[in-house]
Image: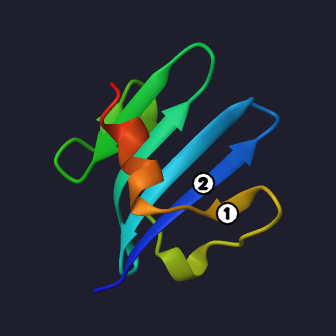
Amino acid sequence: MEEIFLKSYYADEDMYVFVHFRGEDAIRQIELTTAFKRFMSEDSPFDGDSMLYDQDFSDLTLDERSSFITEEEFNEIWNNR
């Protein structure tokens, strides 16, 4: 099953969102702002008022705010809690 790592920036919230997909399903997610870091996973899908992305990867509309990143880039943030 394909592993996909995505980084998106949301200017209106000044927030970066990192999502790790396995196939169509999000299995890990990070929300990063200057005020907080939130970590969600299949085992723990909620952190504060945030929730693990629950739509299929193919439902995403990717634009200039989004880019594919490496597993290493994702894990560097994931492991730096």
Q: Quadrant of residue 14?
A: top right
Q: Which residue is mark 2?
A: 7
Identify the residue shown where x is 35% and y is 39%: 78
Left or right: 62 as drawn, with respect to 11: left
Q: Which mark is residue 44?
A: none
The image shows residue 41 at horizontal and vertical percentages of 27, 48
- Return the x and y of residue 30 as percentages of the image width and height: 45, 40
Residue 36 appears in the figure = yes
What SS does tag 2 mark?
A: strand
Compare residues 57 and 68 and report the one nearer the observer. 68
Q: Is 60 above or below relative to 10? A: below
Q: What is the secondary structure assignment of the residue under circle 1?
A: strand
Q: Residue furthest bottom?
A: 1
Please state if 25 lies on the left or on the right of 67 as rendered.
left
Amino acid of disc 2: Lys
Q: In the image, what residue occupies the spot 61% across and 24% down?
A: 33
Q: Quadrant of the N terminus?
A: bottom left
Query: Pointers 2 and 1 in contact (CB under 8 A)?
Result: yes
Of the image marks 2 and 1, the number of the one nearer the N terminus: 2
Q: Is residue 76 above or below residue 8?
A: above
Depth check, front residue: 32 or 55: 32
Per the image, the residue denoted by label 1 is 67
Q: Position of residue 39 (x, y in %)?
A: 36, 35
Q: Residue furthest top?
A: 35
Relative depth, front residue between 16 and 12: 16
- Left/right of residue 46 with respect to residue 43 in the rendered view: right
